[in-house]
Image (cartoon, helix red, strand yellow):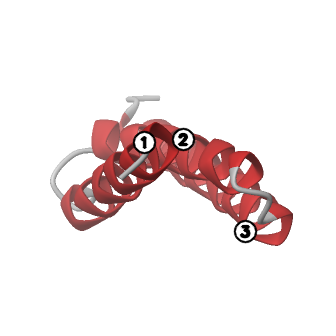
Amino acid sequence: MNEITVFGVLALTFMMAMYSLEGRHRRFTLAFAFGCLLSSAYGFLIGAWPFGVVEIIWCAFALRKFQLRRDQQTPA
């Protein structure tokens, strides 16, 4: 197994773990967004640019979800 494959396995494992923990705290949503960026980088590194683009889009959705959850918990 080469270094890029190991990076990909770790990035996807991290992303999925953070996705499964999202309901526990909003920080896991931010970590999920970071995992999406890592997965996107992996996609571009292996030449699967559609995967890389989709992961960037997922990152944007996760960041928006983090922002909405942060705003809901901030007292007015």
Q: Could you say whether the residue bearing mark 1 is in a helix, strand or loop?
A: helix
First in sequence, mark 3 or 1: give its number. Answer: 1
The label nearer to you, 3 versus 1, is 1
Amino acid under label 2? Leu
Residues packed near mark 1 inside 10 Å, few (<14), some (14 to 19) or many (20 plus): some
Tell me if residue 48 comes above or below residue 42 in the rendering: below
Image position, residue 4 (x, y; %): 51, 43
Local crowd size for mark 2, using a 10 Å CA cut-off: few (<14), some (14–19), many (≥20): many
Question: In the rendered image, which quarter is residue 17 located in?
Answer: bottom left
The mark that comes first in sequence, 2 or 3, is 2
Residue type for callout 3: Phe
Numbered circles on residues, count: 3
Q: Which residue sits at x=40%, y=30%?
A: 74
Labels 2 and 3 touching (C-beta < 8 A): no
- Single out the residue that lies furthest toward the front: 1
> Above or below — where is 21 with respect to 66?
below
Distance, label 2 to label 3, CA atoms, is 12 Å
The residue labelled by disc 3 is 51
Residue drawn at (69%, 55%) of the image: 46
Label 2 secondary element: helix
* Residue found 54% across the figure and 41% down from its top: 38
Pointer 1 residue: 7
Image marks 2 and 1: residues in contact by CB distance under 8 Å: yes
In the image, taking residue 76 as reference, residue 46 lies left or right, namely: right
Location of residue 7 in the rendering, given as x and y in whole percent from the top left corner = 42, 42
Residue type at the position of mark 1: Phe
Residue ID for mark 2: 38
Along the line of sight, which residue is nearer the eye, 46 or 11?
46
